[in-house]
Image (tube, rainbow, N blue to C red):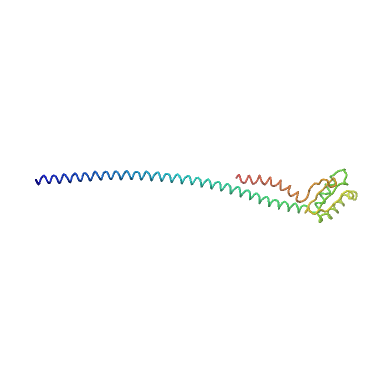
Amino acid sequence: MAEELKELIEKIQLEGVKAAEDKALVIEAEARARADKAVEKGAKEAERMISEAKAEIRRLEEGAKNSVKQASRDTMLSLRKEIYSVLERIVGSHVHKALSAEELAKILTTMIKGHGGEDKQNIIVSLKKDDLEKVEKAVFAELGQEAKKGIRLKVVTDIHGGFLISYDSGRSYFDFSDKALAEYLSLHLKARLGDIVKEAAAK
């Protein structure tokens, strides 16, 4: 009887151990399955985050490139505007200095003589007050008394240098004022300067 009881106890113990082992295996398998799912989910989440980060980096890079391009354009426009402004001041200053009364007298004498044999009775020269007296003396001394009768010099207040000349009693004028000459020279120089700025920008 004791032997049978012992065998029964051993059998119960063996069955209990096996049941426990089987249960442990089930728990382990479930744990592995949950872990695999967690890893898979984590990998997908990490992949999503990396993809979003790359997209954001591309967006920021594109924005930065556009900002740099716009800043470059703004800088070039601002620089060009400043260069043109300086150029206008320089040209205006040099033209004004070049148009001294003595130079005006030489230019006017040449222009009046160059009018050929046509009637010089209709020539009107307009100058600022400070230049008129010096120019009048020099021009008339060069052209002689006969020319003095047909040429009229008059003062105008809106000229700061240079002169206007009319060969048809004032109906039309050729503008050789310092302002007109400076504008003409500036336009010519701006075109050339614009090419230089473009070449520099391309490099």
Quadrant of the frame with the N terminus: top left
Above or below, comparing residue 133 to residue 195 in the picture:
below
> Outermost residue, left direction?
1
Residue 56 location (% of width, % of height): 48, 46
Q: How many marks?
A: 0
Image coordinates of residue 122 in percent, x first then y, are 87, 46
**Picture quadrant where residue 29 is located:** top left
Give coordinates of residue 61: x percent, y percent: 51, 46
Residue 79: x percent and y percent? 64, 50
32 to the left or right of 17: right
> Which residue is more in the foreground, 125 or 93?
125
Indicate left or right for 22 with 51 as reference: left
| Left or right, 43 with reference to 139 | left
Q: Quadrant of the C terminus?
A: top right
Q: From the viewer's side, name the closer residue of 128 and 142.
A: 128
Query: Hey, which residue is sitting farthest bottom in the picture?
Result: 130
> Which quadrant of the structure image shows residue 22?
top left
